[in-house]
């Protein structure tokens, strides 16, 4: 590919310094994605600038006007502290006719809202766990149709915020307590789902109209599953020592036959299309021992740090990290928002 001007945008606290020498391990950990993407773009021969975004759009507008990037590499996960507002930034880029990587505003909006995701998929007859929403500030009413055990989580937050072993509830009293916990501690609506006991599988997808799926990845709970239910709690996602202690790991899902893997890959593509996703995404599933599969959530613009699940599953089929970043850039350049159809 010819050298392009690539403007990398991220949260203002995550702008990596020129060199990571002298940073603490924690500081490096926080800016790892930015650093990996930046250095890959640079190694690919692109001209790269990084812009930290806080709660203002003026600088973004000026930088785009003055520097005229061919593409914006979007690593933003929020705007002004609000996760769902990242879609507005992308919508703004479309408005000013700026190409960008990752998901379009419509796909971001649908996938960030776990309930809307389930409602859209229900129309397509794609299974997600049966659920009830408990809005913040509304009185608790007993759900009649749901079967215990149930799982209580935030309807809008991600990164397993508010998720621990106590998220699995066996009776009405604990359900009521956990719903209040989400309301009070996470300050969001509570989503209550039937608990799906089974394997936890992730599938990466790349593409705009022609889609490619990455190998099925499994979160292996190690020794943890002997003492408690295997779920991806906040602690499990954030605490490297805890992962090591229990032998928790991720890797290619073993033992799936060709036709089963094929069925899952096709399901992943259907979901990606149904939610109007573009660029790249990772879909989180649970599979019961009888083979039935439920989508837990779709992650638009998922984590693409080197060595993490998405990049590792690409590597497993020979797509090295720089090639992956290059594909994401190309998908951004090729994406056809409405303004380009009238060019
Ligand atoms: N209905 C459910 N049944 C079983 N486990 C669940 C269910 N919902 C969530 N989990 C567990 O909680 C984790 C986080 O839930 P998820 O919906 O993916 O939210 P997040 O956006 O925080 O990743 C999942 O990876 C899974 O381990
Ligand atoms: Mg998840």
Image (tube, grey):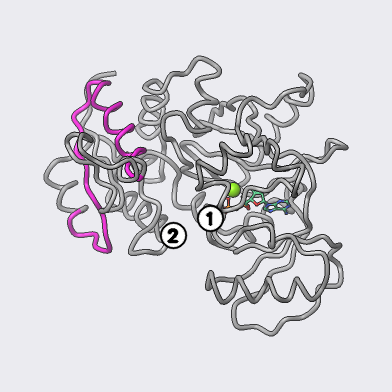
Q: Magenta segment range?
A: 30-59
Residue carrying label 2: 83
Residue neighbourhood size for the residue with mark 1, other residues' Cα within 10 Å, grouped as few (<14), some (14–19), many (≥20): some
How far across and down, in percent of the image, does residue 255 sit? Answer: 77, 22
- Is 245 situated above or below 60? above
Q: For the N terminus, which image quadrant?
A: top left
Is 56 inside the magenta-drawn segment?
yes
* Left or right, residue 182 beside residue 194: left
Residue located beneath label 1 in the image: 158
Q: Which comes sooner in the sequence, label 2 or label 1? A: 2
Q: Nearer the viewer, residue 247 or 318?
A: 247
Label 1 lies in ligand 1 vicinity (Cβ under 8 Å): yes
Quadrant where the image shows the C terminus:
top left
Task: Tell me where residue 191 appears, x and y as whole percent.
Answer: 67, 65
Membership of 328 in magenta stretch: no
Residue 247 in view: yes
Residue at 61% across, 41% down: 283
The image position of residue 256, as x and y in percent, is 77, 24
Give the structural element (helix, strand or loop) at label 1: loop
**Disc 2 to disc 1, C-alpha distance:** 9 Å
173 displayed left or right of 337: right
Residue at 69 percent of width and 69 percent of height: 133
Question: Few, some or many C-alpha atoms within 10 Å of disc 2 (few <14, some 14-19, many ≥20)?
Answer: some
Judge whether residue 99 can be spotted in this image: no
Task: Please identify the residue farthest to the left as the structure is shown.
Answer: 66
Which label sits on residue 199? none
Quadrant position of residue 265:
top right
């Amino acid at each position: 590919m010819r050298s392009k001007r690539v403007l990398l945008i991220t949260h203002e606290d995550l702008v990596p310094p020129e060199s990571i020498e002298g940073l603490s391990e924690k500081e490096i950990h926080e800016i790892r994605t930015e650093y990996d993407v930046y250095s890959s773009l640079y190694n690919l021969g692109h001209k790269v600038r990084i812009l930290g975004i806080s709660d203002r759009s003026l600088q973004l507008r000026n930088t785009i006007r003055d520097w005229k990037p061919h593409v914006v590499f979007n690593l933003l996960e929020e705007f002004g502290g609000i996760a769902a507002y990242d879609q507005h930034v992308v919508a703004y880029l479309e408005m000013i006719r700026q190409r960008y990587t990752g998901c379009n505003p419509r796909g971001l909006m649908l996938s960030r809202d776990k309930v809307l995701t389930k409602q859209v998929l229900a129309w397509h007859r794609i299974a997600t766990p049966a659920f009830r929403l408990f809005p913040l500030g509304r009185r608790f009413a007993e759900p009649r149709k749901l079967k215990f055990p149930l799982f209580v989580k935030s309807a809008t937050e991600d990164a397993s915020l508010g998720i621990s072993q106590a998220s699995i509830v066996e009776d009405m009293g604990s359900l009521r307590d956990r719903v209040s916990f989400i309301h009070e501690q996470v300050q969001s609506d509570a989503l209550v789902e039937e608990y799906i006991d089974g394997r936890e599988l992730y599938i990466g997808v790349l593409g705009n109209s022609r889609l490619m799926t990455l190998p099925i990845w499994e979160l292996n709970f190690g020794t943890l599953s002997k003492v408690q239910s295997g779920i991806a709690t906040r602690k499990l996602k954030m605490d490297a020592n805890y992962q090591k202690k229990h032998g928790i790991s991720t890797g290619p899902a073993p033992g799936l036959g060709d036709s089963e893997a094929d069925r899952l890959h096709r399901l992943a593509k259907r979901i990606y299309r149904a939610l109007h996703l573009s660029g790249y995404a990772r879909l989180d599933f649970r599979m019961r021992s009888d083979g039935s599969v439920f989508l837990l959530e779709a992650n638009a613009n998922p984590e693409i740090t080197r060595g993490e699940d998405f990049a590792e599953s690409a590597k497993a089929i020979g797509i090295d990290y720089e090639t992956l970043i290059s594909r994401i850039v190309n998908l951004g350049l090729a994406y056809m928002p409405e303004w380009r159809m009238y060019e």
